[in-house]
Image (spheres, rainbow, N blue to C red):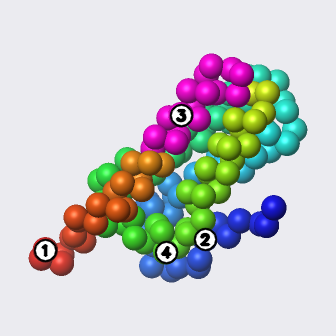
Amino acid sequence: MPKARWYVQSDSMPAELKRVTDAVIHATTGVQATLRHRPPDESALDAFWCLQDRVHQLLAHIRDHPWKITMLRETHPDLARTVVEVLSRARKSPFFQKAAIQQACTTINDSLMELQWIKDKKQYSRPGNGS
């Protein structure tokens, strides 16, 4: 599997968007490690819940500032795809037999779908644009 291109260097990315995006990247890496190393169920559940929480924080930030979805897509073009790939691998793992992990994966997927919907909607304006 080719190494994911997490981000494109951008000095203009707002600090809060950078913080929540970096948290999603870190949590995704944690789930990837969980799938590789198969720790005890409690640790695995923590990793999935962390990713669920971080993706939800990103969604909440984009809901509050929908115009930043374009910036997110420009600076982190493979972020959603990488999370989806991790969820796909999780569905094939023994961890997915746990109801709590199934629910976390479903919730993460729902959040990613809403982010896609916001991107596709494109009925937002950047503050100060007058539109």
Mark nearer the N terminus (2 vs 1): 2
Which residues are drawn in magenta?
96-111
Q: Crowding near pointer 4: few (<14 within 10 Å), some, many (20+)?
A: some
Q: Which residue is mark 1?
A: 131
CB contact under 8 Å: marks 4 and 1: no
Q: Residue at x 71, y 38 (%)?
A: 90
State how far apart marks 2 and 1 are (Cα). 29 Å
Amino acid on which disc 3 is placed? Thr
Q: Crowding near pointer 2: few (<14 within 10 Å), some, many (20+)?
A: some
Q: Residue furthest top?
A: 99
**Residue 58: image location, x then y, percent:** 45, 51
Q: Which residue is more in the foreground, 34 or 85?
A: 85
**Residue 40: image location, x then y, percent:** 82, 24
**Residue 121: image location, x then y, percent:** 29, 61
Numbered label attached to residue 74: 4
Q: Which residue is mark 2?
A: 7
Q: Identify the secondary structure beneath mark 3.
A: helix
Mark nearer the N terminus (3 vs 2): 2
State how far apart marks 4 and 2 are (Cα). 8 Å
Q: Which residue is mark 3?
A: 106
Between label 4 and label 3, give the one nearer the viewer.
3
Numbered label attached to residue 83: none
State how far apart marks 3 and 1 are (Cα). 35 Å
